[in-house]
Structures are given as structure tokens and as C-alpha cells.
Amino acid sequence: MPIPKSHELTMRCPVCFNREIDVLMSLVDGRYCCLKCSYNGTEADVRDMYKDIQKKFKWIGKRVTIEDYDRL
Ligand SMILES: [Zn+2]
């Protein structure tokens, strides 16, 4: 795999990010490739996976009280 240029390292790997590892991907022939876990996909694939990851942080800005837990 060729060494990526710095401007090609623009998106984080969604698979690694889900495991709380921050790895940037390189762009090879229009597909983003992870250097760590060998995930590869188009920009649309990566953005879809970002949306899934964002579900995990849906309530990050909310304060959840004991009463809220009881209602869940
Ligand atoms: Zn990865």
C-alpha cells in the first residue's frame, strides 16, 4: 500500500472508532481504507456507519435522573 499524502487522511475509520481507537483512513481509488483493521468503503458507506455510531451518543447532552431511569 502506498504511503498516503496528508490531505488524503480525512476520515476516521468507523470500525476502529466504534472500538474507541482513533485511526484516519487513506483514500485509494475513491475508497477509504483503514491502515489498522483493513476496513474499506466509499464515503457513503463510511457516513452510514458514522450514523450508526452516533446512536450510541444520542443522550450524551442530557442529564438522566433516577426518576428517568425508573420510567425507562
Ligand atoms: Zn479501522
Image (cartoon, rainbow, N blue to C red):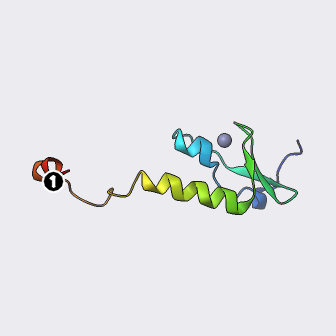
Residue toward you, 5 or 34? 34
Above or below, 45 against 19 in this view is below
Which of the 4 image quarters holds residue 38?
top right
Residue toward you, 42 or 5? 42
Quadrant location of the N terminus?
top right
Residue toward you, 42 or 16? 42
Q: Is residue 9 left or right of residue 22?
A: right
Which of the 4 image quarters holds residue 2?
top right
The number of discs equals 1
Q: Residue at x 53, y 38 (%)?
A: 19
Residue 64: percent from left, percent from top: 20, 53
Above or below, 34 against 5 in this view is above
Residue 29: percent from left, percent from top: 88, 57
Q: Residue at x 53, y 43 (%)?
A: 18
Q: Is residue 19 left or right of residue 69?
A: right
Q: Residue at x 33, y 56 (%)?
A: 60
Residue 5: percent from left, percent from top: 82, 55
Label 1 Cα neighbours within 10 Å, binned few <14 / some 14-19 / many ≥20: few
Q: Is residue 68 left or right of residue 48?
A: left
Residue 67: percent from left, percent from top: 10, 52
Residue denoted by label 1: 68
Q: Residue at x 56, y 40 (%)?
A: 21
Looking at the image, which residue sits at the far front?
72
Which of the 4 image quarters holds residue 43?
bottom right
Q: Amino acid at mark 1?
A: Asp
Ligand 1 quarter of the rendering: top right
